[in-house]
Amino acid sequence: MKYLDIEVITRLDLAKLAKGTLTKYWLHIISNGIAQPIYLPIMVAKGASDGPVLGITAAVHGNELNGISIIHEVFNQIDVNTLRGTVVGVPVMNIPSIINQERRFVDGEDLNRIMPGKADGSVSQVYVHRFIDRVISEFEYLLDLHTASFGRVNSYYIRADLKRKITSRMAEVLNAEIILNNEGSDGTLRSAAANLGIHAVTIEVGDPNQFQKGMIDSGLAGTLNVMRYLKMIEGEVIEPKRPAVICKKSKWLYANRGGILEVFPEVTQKIKKGDKIAIVRDIFGDIINTYNSPEEGIIIGKNVHPVSQTGGRLIHLGTIK
Ligand SMILES: [Zn+2]
């Protein structure tokens, strides 16, 4: 069966594809409440010679869009006649949510906290389970592209388990501003993939709800570098001009008082213990709280939404290794 002239499948099967081909699919993952299919877009570039299988996924959160454009750009660069191995792109994983312009799934779940889901589970559990079973299980390497959440901004940073040698090197060659060590046993796609023996990293490329050219260029350059490292394309790995700042851990700092928030340091800025990081004003404009950093570190991400209820986020602070 075809839809818009593109073949509809229910499971990705890379072995049956001919070498040296570029194929697009709709993968029928679930059906909606009026029995219409929900199709995942899948792009497959199978090189003329054998090599690794690299999967690139985007929009696991429905408002995280930069990764879509990165996947388009990567596929624009691929020549299947010289490619070694296979690149699979899933430009949108969370179809219902991107249509609704929402981060979370239709049942309110955060899909990147409930992986690998359940075959006979709830609406969101079965969706992620089928995605992993029918798509991700074909991969050997995974780049999962994300952005900050609504109201926040991020640097271009990587989350990876740096104890694993190959994922650590993948993180390095992605030419990010910051690499955050994170073991990731937390229901993420990255951890579910790692449990299947897939070398997986999470890439955070900037801000939600938009295409940011600079971030997309960085993600493209990083992805091509990973492909060089895996010897899927010709050329030496291009080492970054400025090596990434490595963080051994990170945490969010929160405001314990609600009000109109202003956060001062910019992403990737290094701060010292005691530096002023934010103020909160009441609605008359008077400052009611000032926040100073409890320790030194680097700003991985920050809140930019001025309306901040008690418990609102301030900064995502990385502890530099
Ligand atoms: Zn995300």
Image: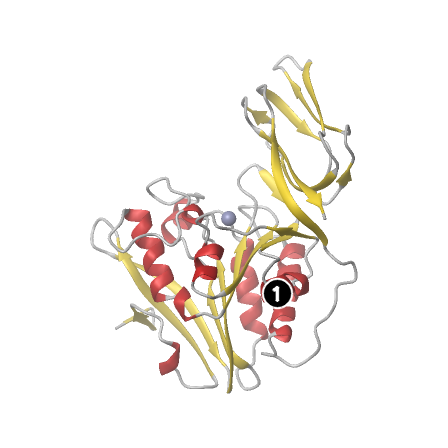
Quick one: 128 or 210, which is closer to the camera? Answer: 128
Image quadrant holding the N terminus, namely bottom left
Residue 306 at what x, y percent from top left? 61, 28
Q: On screen, 19 above or below 224?
A: below
In the rendered picture of this protein, how many numbered marks are placed on residues? 1
Residue that badge 1 annotates:
165
Left or right of residue 30, residue 281 in this image? right
Q: Residue at x 59, y 19 (%)?
A: 257
- Give amino acid for label 1: Lys
Residue 137, quarter of picture: bottom left
Q: Residue at x 45, y 44 (%)?
A: 103
Query: Circle 1 sits in a helix, a strand or a loop, which is it?
Result: helix
Tell me residue 192's x, y (percent): 43, 57
Q: Does 175 appear above or below 97?
A: below
Residue at 56% x, 72% y is 76
Q: Position of residue 93 (x, y in %)?
A: 42, 57
Splitting the image into 4 quarters, where does residue 289 fall?
A: top right
- In-image side of 309 versus 43 (left or right): right
Residue 245: give x, y in percent of width and height: 73, 52
Is residue 16 left or right of 253 when viewed as pictured? left
Vertical order, 317 against 78 (above or below): above
Looking at this view, is 273 or 104 the one in front?
Answer: 273
At x 43%, y 64%, the residue is 196
Q: Is residue 289 above or below residue 42?
A: above
Residue 272 located left or right of residue 261: right
